[in-house]
Image: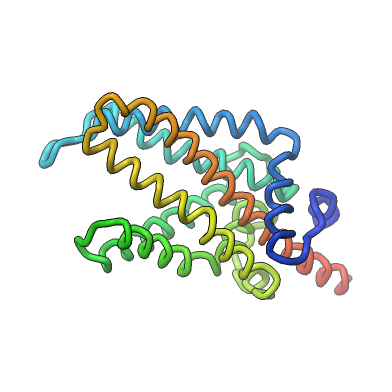
Amino acid sequence: MVEAVEKLGQPRSGLSGFLREALRSLGAGGIVPVALALLVLLTFSNIVILQNMPAKASPPAAAFLVAAVLRVGGLLLIAVAILRMLTASPRRRWLPDGGFWLYVLTFAVSTGVTAAVALLMGSRTGLANLILSNVLVTLLLSPFVVWFVALAVVKPLAWRPGPWLRHFGKWWPPVLFWTLLLVTPMAVLHATIDMRLIAGAGESFWPLALFDGALSTIMALLAIAINAAGYRRVAEDHGSRLSART
């Protein structure tokens, strides 16, 4: 697996080199059709959700529930498949195996952290609050992204975090930097657009909804590529240590 990762892209030094490596990895064979499927999923599931938002004290409509389940489930399935492509994983790309379900668990943990930060921030609204909450979530979760990726792609299962939560100087600074600089602003813009759409955008609904779908897709792909690039730095060292023992 290590040799395949090295062929996929040698880790580049520096912040700009890290980003170029991450972006270049998205040009790997098979990514484009999967990215298009992600675009369709995120765009139209969000439209259905927004058009069927339940009123206060009212149960959600069936269309809302179906769209929400398809959005989350489809996003997780596609994210794991792309991660396995970008890391030359020996696991089958579309198989919901143990690695997939462990990655689902990391999504649940991330959602819980996001909810806890939102609770901590209280009922305050506004752009500054939105930015601060997204930055806090990134700071809390980014040290674990390499292990999260390993859970999805490594075979056998990467139960132990120790082998993956190491050499932070190699990967965490660029992961944190580019996530805060690129992904976090996109997340803030996405949330702002959704709030506008929920409040009622009138004739601007469809243009905003379609733009938001494209934005969500770019944001997801960028986050996946950045996290995978961080993982490859640790995987290379992990493989070297295993080779030294044999």
Q: For the view shown, which residue lies furthest in the left direction?
A: 57
Task: Tell whether 203 sits left or right of 182.
Answer: left
The x and y percentages for residue 55 are 14, 36
Task: Tell whether 55 sits left or right of 91.
Answer: left
**Which residue shows up at 43% across the image and 29% down it?**
210
* Along the viewing direction, whichever of 159 and 35 lies nearer the viewer: 35
* Along the viewing direction, whichever of 16 and 23 lies nearer the viewer: 16
**Which residue shows up at 67% across the image and 67% down it?**
171
Question: Colour scheme of this structure image?
Answer: rainbow
Q: Quadrant of residue 196?
A: top left
**Which residue shows up at 28% across the image and 43% down it?**
195
**Which residue shows up at 58% across the image and 60% down it?**
178
- The quadrant in which the C terminus is found is bottom right
Q: Using the image, determine if residue 34 lies above or below residue 97.
A: above
Q: Using the image, determine if residue 157 lies above or below residue 245.
A: above
Q: Using the image, determine if residue 225 lies above or below residue 137.
A: above
The x and y percentages for residue 164 are 65, 68
The x and y percentages for residue 23 are 68, 47
Q: How many numbered marks does the figure carry?
A: 0
The x and y percentages for residue 70 are 42, 33
Q: Using the image, determine if residue 61 lies above or below residue 145.
A: above
